Image: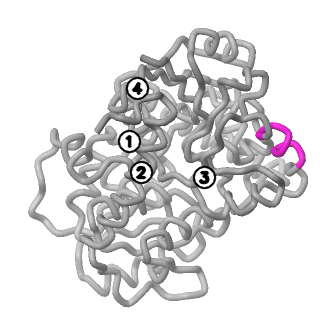
Amino acid sequence: MKKVGILTRHVYPNYGSLLQSRALESALVAVGAEPRVIDYFPVTDRPLRLAASRLKESRVRGSAAKSAAYLAIQTPNMATMSLRFRKFQRRHLTLTQTCGDDRSVLETADDLDFVLSGSDQVWNSIHGQLDPVYFLEGQKPDKKHSYAASFGSSAPSSADIDRVAEWLEDFRSVSVRETSAQTALAKIGISSRVDVDPVLLHGKDYWTDFSKSYDPTDNDYILVYQLHNTPGFSERLAAIQGRHNLPVRRVTPDAKMLVEHRASDYLVDPAKFVALFRDASYVVTDSFHGTAFSLVFGRPIYALLPQSNSTRNEDLLASVGLARLASTLEAPPVEDPIYDAAEVTANLQGRARDSWSHLRALVGTEGRP
């Protein structure tokens, strides 16, 4: 049984980050591996440092007064999120010892047969720069693989392209999440394959079982999961609510959004998060994983694209023939968010089968059902 390390952004206080980590670990167990999530916890992501790290990417960073106000509000907010999600991580993931830097990650990998970098946005700029750890810098070439890794956008930036090519050239296998990433890597001579995000390896039955501690609700509602500061989101949500005349339930880990939008479901545990998608009448979201869970459960979805890094959302919808559901700031919400759920499920299952085969090949269990 091969010991496999999963190196991903599991510590970031976000439902998608946690659930994709859980899903990949479960999948590796199912194909006969012994997975461990490498508990890489960089200093920049620590509870009391996270707000300062995020400030580097904020639009207010150019103003000293606004930056101070941002830190005053977001430091306790982000710390609360981080500490709560830390409990979730320990409950739902099989973690190694905590690693604070590249050296400790390398030492942890010494006892593993290989390391998978991914899924999620491991190859995106994190707090203003790429993190070489997620490119497995320093790992032995025979241990270097990725699974459904994402750049967040369609391609590495022009400033990073040479470093990315150098980091990836000795990977045993490169798997990305978006077709746009595969195209971009081909241009710099890196061969790759496209695999589904780990949450899509598992279908409706798996996620229904995961959320079974929450009884189904008979009350119709519109579920809102807003992850980004997407312009026009509130106005478009108001139009959607007026169209369906249903109550809104808003799930969020963010206290700032709780105050501003009176969210009904704040920092709920991951099982309830999934249950909210399971039982929703409609979903309004600008999140990749919000979109993914909507498709898993066949929920009618208003996919409002974030202002930046929307490629992953668009690629996912296009991959199942639902590009029409992607709504930009300039366009009103789609008139009809309903689609053939059975057809989408069949499409997702077909893509997942190929990814399952790839995971079996990686761990040497191709003959398993």
Q: Measure the C-alpha gap from mark 2 to mark 3.
A: 33 Å
Residue of label 4: 93
The answer to which of 309 and 176 lies nearer the viewer is 176
Residue in view at x 58 percent, y 39 percent: 118
Q: Disc 2 marks which residue?
A: 252
Considering depth in this image, is 314 or 51 the residue closer to the camera? Answer: 314
Answer yes or no: do the residues labelled 1 and 2 have beta carbons within 8 Å? Answer: yes
Q: Secondary structure at mark 3?
A: strand
Residue 336 is situated, as x and y percent measured from the top left of the image, at 34, 87
- Name the amino acid, label 1: Leu
The disc, 1 or 3, on the residue closer to the chain's N-terminal end is 3
Label 1 and label 2: CA atoms lie apart by 6 Å
Q: Quadrant of the C terminus?
A: top left
- Earlier residue among tags 2 and 3: 3
Q: Locate the N terminus by quadrant.
A: top left
Circles 1 and 3: CB atoms closer than 8 Å = no
* Residue at image point 26% right, 47% down: 207
Tag 3 residue: 193
Q: Residues within 10 Å of mark 4 (few under 14, many from 20)?
A: many
Mark number, residue 267:
1
Which quadrant holds residue 49? Answer: top right
Residue interval drawn in magenta: 162-168
Sequence-first disc among 3 and 4 = 4
